Image (cartoon, grey):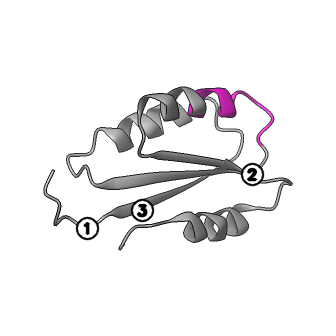
């Protein structure tokens, strides 16, 4: 990886996406551009979303996962992710 490539932050708010999150993460980690962080903010899912995300996060250090303390909606999730992001873009 070229050290001069800027870090890109990808923000993914999630809520009860157990059936789709693995396909999403697979697509993101397979990008040809590698200098990125994938920030997933879980808005208090009550399905198996957490377990699937943790499995992926254990395999790829670019994945950052946080769970909100209470269900707050997509806008709050995105704002929390922006606060955690380190990317230039």
Give the secondary structure at mark 3: strand
Residue 71 shows in the view: yes
Query: Label 1: which residue?
Result: 6
Give the secondary structure at mark 2: loop
Which mark sits nearer the N-terminus, 2 or 1?
Answer: 1
Residue at the spot 81% in from the left edge and 35% down from the top edge: 46
Residue 20 shows in the view: no
Stretch in magenta: 45-53
**Callout 2 environment at 10 Å: few (<14), some (14 to 19), or many (20+)?**
many
Image vertical order of residue 57 relative to residue 62, above or below: above
Q: Nearer the viewer, residue 61 or 48?
A: 61
Query: Label 3: which residue?
Result: 9
**Callout 3 environment at 10 Å: few (<14), some (14 to 19), or many (20+)?**
many
Res 27 → quadrant: top left
Nearest-to-viewer mark from 2 and 1: 1
Q: CA distance from mark 2 to mark 3?
A: 19 Å
């Amino acid at each position: 990886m070229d050290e001069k490539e800027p870090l890109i932050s990808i923000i993914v708010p999630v809520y009860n996406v157990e059936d789709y999150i693995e396909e999403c993460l697979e697509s993101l980690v397979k990008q040809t551009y590698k200098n990125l962080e994938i920030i997933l903010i879980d808005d208090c899912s009550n399905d198996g979303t957490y377990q699937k995300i943790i499995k992926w996060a254990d395999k790829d250090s670019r994945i950052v996962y946080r769970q909100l303390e209470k269900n707050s909606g997509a806008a709050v999730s995105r704002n929390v992710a922006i606060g955690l992001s380190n990317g230039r873009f």
